[in-house]
Amino acid sequence: MSDEELQAFWTVDDAICAGRYRDAFELASPWAEANCGWAENGLGSLYACGFGAPLDTSLAIHYYERAAAHGVAGAWYALGTVYSTGGENVPANDLKAAECYRKAEDLGYVLGAPHDFALPRSRSDS
């Protein structure tokens, strides 16, 4: 990850932690369009929750699937959650959910781990 991308990640993370979801959405969007998995996963979460973006399960799945294609374990877990619970125009599907959860686990996803566990623990570590 380049220094510029790492700085963008932390800026988006700071916005989310401060509850500035619209800022996080606007900051992550260009990175998601540039195929950055962490940003695609973040947009998926914002759409899934309706924070900083309209609540839209279909768009959440779209961005989670893009992030999952980049090997983002958390995106696989999020997809599992969406399919487990269902949503607007997305029926619950336990088999699909289990498949997504398995892929997340295969990629090393640990429930309860910080979303940025693969990144430096602090800005001074980078």
Image (cartoon, rainbow, N blue to C red):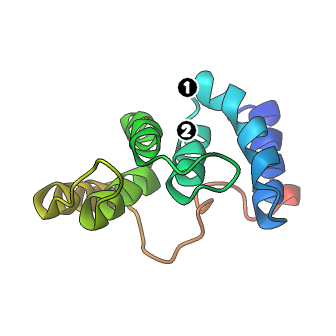
Q: Residue furthest right?
A: 124
Give left or right: position of 97 versus 55. left
Disc number for residue 93: none
Q: Residue at x 77, y 47 (%)?
A: 22
First in sequence, mark 2 or 1: give its number: 1
Residue at mark 1? 35
Residue 35 shows in this picture: yes
Badge 1 crowding class, 10 Å Cα cut-off, few under 14, some 14 to 19, many 20 or more, is: some
> Secondary structure under badge 1?
loop
Please state which of residues 74 and 86 is positioned toward the viewer in this rendering: 86
Give coordinates of residue 124: x percent, y percent: 88, 58
Looking at the image, do the residues carrying marks 2 and 1 touch, with CB atoms under 8 Å apart?
A: yes
Give coordinates of residue 26: x percent, y percent: 76, 37
Quadrant for residue 116, please give it.
bottom right
Give left or right: position of 18 versus 77. right
- The tally of labels here is 2
Q: Residue at x 34, y 53 (%)?
A: 79
Q: Residue at x 82, y 32 (%)?
A: 4
Badge 2 crowding class, 10 Å Cα cut-off, few under 14, some 14 to 19, many 20 or more, is: many
Residue at mark 2? 40
Give coordinates of residue 100: x percent, y percent: 25, 55
Give left or right: position of 90 versus 96. right
Q: Residue furthest top?
A: 34
Q: Residue furthest left?
A: 95
Q: Residue furthest bottom?
A: 112
Please state which of residues 10 and 122 is positioned toward the viewer in this rendering: 10
Quadrant for residue 50, please give it.
bottom right
Three-letter amino acid code at the position of disc 2: Glu
> Secondary structure under badge 2?
helix
Give coordinates of residue 75: x percent, y percent: 43, 51
Q: Residue at x 54, y 53 (%)?
A: 45
